Amino acid sequence: MRVYTFLEARRKLYSLLSKAVKDGEIHVRRRDVQTFIIKPEKGRGFPLAVGGVDLGITPREIVELVQEGRSGGFV
């Protein structure tokens, strides 16, 4: 495990954050010898990245339903 100084971390922040994603965490030590662990937050992703739902209908049926809805077929 490599421990980075505060000055190194400040200069290389972007690459160290990428390293934290790859390795799980990085350690940064201040001059007063206090050490901090930086690690990526788990379970968060793009908020619109959701799984699909299998409705059991074909793409053609979906198009027909949309066209029907646009023509006023639904009440």
Image (cartoon, rainbow, N blue to C red):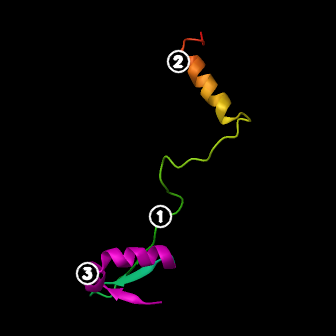
**Residue where numbered disc 1 is placed:** 41
Contact (Cβ within 8 Å) of mark 2 with mark 3: no
Upstream in sequence: badge 1 or badge 2: 1
Q: Position of residue 71 (x, y in %)?
A: 54, 14
* Kind of residue indicated by mark 3: Arg
Q: Judge whether 48 appears above or below 13 on screen.
A: above
Q: Position of residue 70 (x, y in %)?
A: 53, 18
Local packing at callout 1 (Cα closer than 10 Å; few below 14, some 14-19, many 20+) is: few
Over which residues does the magenta segment extend?
1-23
Q: Secondary structure at mark 1?
A: loop
Image quadrant where one finds the C terminus = top right
* Kind of residue indicated by mark 1: Glu
Residue at far bottom of view: 2
Distance (Cα) linking label 1 and label 3: 22 Å
**Residue where numbered disc 3 is placed:** 11
Left or right relative to 61: residue 20: left
Q: Secondary structure at mark 3?
A: helix
Contact (Cβ within 8 Å) of mark 1 with mark 3: no
Res 66 label:
none
Q: Secondary structure at mark 2?
A: helix
Left or right relative to 75: residue 13: left
Q: Position of residue 6 (x, y in %)?
A: 28, 83
